[in-house]
Every structure is written in C-alpha cells, then in structure tokens.
Amino acid sequence: MKMNNLKREWEEIAGQDAFWAVLSQRDQKFGKWDVQQFFRTGEEEIQAVMKSADRLSFPSRRQMALDFGCGPGRLTRALSKYFTQCVGVDISEKMIDSARSLNPDSSIYTFYVNDQDNLRLFADNHFDLIYTNLVLQHLPSDTIVYSFISEFVRVLKPHGLLVFQLPNTIPFHVRIQPRRNLYRVLRMLGFSEKFLYWKLGLHPVRMRAIPKSDIESFLTSAGAKLLEVQPQTNTEFSVESSMYFATK
C-alpha cells in the first residue's frame, strides 16, 4: 500500500513538473528548468562522483551502471560517458516515458518502471556501479529504505561501487511537511493536482532522514564494506546529508 501511494504521488508530480520534482531548486519551480541546463547538472554531478571513484579505486570494471530513481534520465545520461551500459529505474511510468523520449539510444540506455520495494528484476552481482541521489529520502518508511539498501548490496558486483545519499537529520519545518499534508487533504476533497501545484504551489513530495551511524551499521550487516562518507549540506532547505561510498 505504501508503494502504491508513493507511485500515485510521483505520477502526479511527474505529470506537472518532472524536472523540478527531480531537482527541486526554488528558482526553477513551475517549469523553469531549461532542458540542456537540467542535463548539464547531471554531467557535473557524475563527474564529481567519478573523481571520488577514481581516488577510491572502485569499481574495478565499468560495464553496467544503475541509476536508481532515474526520473527523466538526467544522471543515466551522464553515467553513459563512463559505463558501457546504463540502466535507469523509477517508480513513475511518466518519468520513465520521459527518460526514454529524452534518451532514445537503446544500445546504451535501458529504463524500467519498478513499483516494488525490491530490485528482483535484477540478478545478484549485476552492476559495477549503483548510484542514487535525492531519492531514498522520498521513500515512505525507514523499512523500505533499508530494503533497497540491502538490494543494492545484493545486485552490486564484487569490487563494484555503491554510492547513495541520505539526510542525517532534517529541520522541524521540513519534517512536518506542511505543503505535502495540505496537498493530500485537498486532493481527497477533489482538487486536481494541476490546480494544487500551479495555483497553490503545493506538492506531494515527502522527506525523511536516518542517522549516519544507523546507515553505517546497516551497511556492515548487509555485507557491504564502507569506503567513505562525504558530508553534504543543502543550504536552501537546511538539510544535512551524507553521501555513502561502499563496496563488497
């Protein structure tokens, strides 16, 4: 039920402003993202990730990469400069339709809709790199976050590299989610997602945090080896996060 609700919410926001839903900068809300600028941010982000990968000497091979929560394929496209095959997964069919349209080269990209709390569509030891940023924080429970981290470790190849981001803490004004809560009430009263987003500026996006020590302990219990944790600060929303680098 939680995943069904999450899917519905992301179909709604993807149908209104998919780029902003992926990269929620205040000055780009309401359809202001330029397509080229949007994808350029992905290139810059992945370039920084790969510099860290080079320093850590992982992954040992660069064949298969997974972009989890790929949206319109912003990071999937950027990963294709470093990996032979790139796979994007998202819970939203609208996001995946957009990704396929914007990244049509089927010899490089494969995009899947996955609305389960697992990655059973992939075999064990499948990916050389797994990357996800600004995604796990939107899942509906800590249990589902842990389920996916466990799945990341399972589908990661030995000597591969897992890189994921999660907030450590979030401030009270973000934690109470006023825009999301009002959005949900008004949707139940029959207001359209278009009216709620474009007229009232409301959206269904949620956010959660898990302490860094808890994630570090869980990675070890899941059979991963933690290589590095990089602190991150989102000054726009006052959110402190960690970027985890792990292998197995």
Image (tube, rainbow, N blue to C red):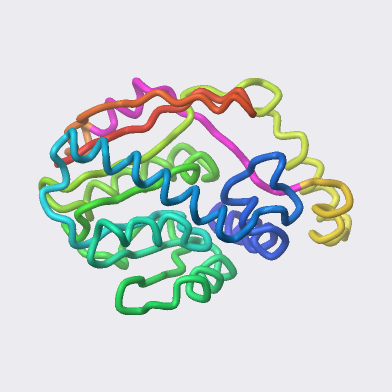
**38 with respect to 28 (left or right):** left
**30 with respect to 86 (left or right):** right
Residue 135, compared with residue 108, is above or below; it is above
Point out residue 119 in the picture as x, y percentages from the top left corner. Answer: 33, 59
The residue depicted at 50 percent of the width and 23 percent of the height is: 240
What number of labels is visible? 0
The residue depicted at 26 percent of the width and 56 percent of the height is: 82
Choose between 142 and 75: the one closer to the eye. 75
Point out residue 144 in the picture as x, y percentages from the top left corner. Answer: 44, 45
207 in the magenta segment: yes
Which quadrant would residue 224 be assigned to in this image? top left
Q: Which residues are magenta?
A: 203-219
Which quadrant would residue 189 be assigned to in this image? bottom right
| Quadrant position of the N terminus in the picture | bottom right
Residue 8, compared with residue 110, is above or below; it is above
Point out residue 127 in the picture as x, y percentages from the top left corner. Answer: 22, 57
98 in the magenta segment: no
**89 with respect to 27 (left or right):** left
Residue 229, compared with residue 142, is above or below; it is above
The residue depicted at 52 percent of the width and 76 percent of the height is: 101
| Quadrant position of the C terminus in the picture | top left
Point out residue 83 in the picture as x, y percentages from the top left corner. Answer: 24, 60
**91 with respect to 26 (left or right):** left
Which quadrant would residue 179 be assigned to in this image? top right
The residue depicted at 33 percent of the width and 43 percent of the height is: 149
